């Protein structure tokens, strides 16, 4: 009896591990502490803070578009399409971070480095948001 219960438990564990995980839309979030953005930025920290505010605003817009696209893809009932979209979004985020880190190498150790990084991310976010809006329109 114990062997049968153990075998059933092991079978349940294996089945749960083999079951496909529920896909979720990827979410862009930042790890920085948001700096203030004054009306008239003057210092390097001011410019960095304003770029960060732009990043956070565009992250929210990207996340909204990603949720919309994810829902549209779910309606098509294609798990493969959802998986490709999720992988693509994760790859895009990795690209954004890596390219922007590379662009700051010119200013390594300088106070301009975080400003260049933040401006880069804000610019890439703007371009990506346009692409996501086009994709959402195509899916409708």
Image (cartoon, helix red, strand yellow):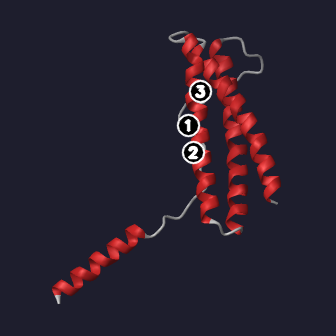
- Crowding around mark 1 (Cα neighbors within 10 Å: few <14, some 14 to 19, many 20+) is few
> From the viewer's perspective, is residue 92 above or below residue 45?
below
> From the viewer's perspective, is residue 37 above or below residue 12?
above
The quadrant where residue 72 appears: bottom right
- Crowding around mark 2 (Cα neighbors within 10 Å: few <14, some 14 to 19, many 20+) is some
Residue 79 on image: x %, y %: 60, 65
Element carrying mark 3: helix
Residue 130 on image: x %, y %: 78, 40
The quadrant where residue 70 appears: bottom right
- The reply to whether dot 1 and dot 2 touch (C-beta < 8 Å) is yes
Which residue lies under the disc numbered 2? Answer: 90
Which residue lies under the disc numbered 1? Answer: 94
Residue 26 on image: x %, y %: 59, 50
Element carrying mark 1: helix
Disc 1 from disc 2: Cα separation: 6 Å
Give the residue drawn at x 61%, y 54%. Answer: 84
Disc 3 from disc 1: Cα separation: 8 Å
Q: Which of the marked residues, 3 or 2, is nearer the chain's N terminus?
A: 2
Which residue lies under the disc numbered 3? Answer: 99
Disc 3 from disc 2: Cα separation: 14 Å
């Amino acid at each position: 009896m114990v062997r049968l219960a153990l075998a059933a438990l092991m079978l349940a564990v294996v089945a749960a591990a083999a079951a496909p995980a529920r896909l979720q839309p990827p979410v862009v979030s930042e790890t920085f502490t948001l700096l203030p953005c004054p009306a008239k930025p003057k210092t390097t920290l001011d410019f960095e803070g304003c770029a960060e505010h732009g990043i956070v605003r565009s992250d929210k817009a990207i996340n909204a578009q990603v949720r919309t696209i994810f829902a549209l893809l779910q309606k098509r009932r294609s798990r493969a399409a959802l998986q490709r979209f999720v992988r693509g979004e994760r790859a895009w985020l990795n690209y954004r971070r890596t390219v922007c880190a590379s662009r700051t190498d010119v200013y390594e150790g300088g106070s301009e480095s975080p400003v260049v990084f933040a401006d880069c991310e804000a610019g890439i976010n703007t371009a990506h948001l346009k692409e996501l809006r086009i994709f959402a329109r195509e899916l409708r």
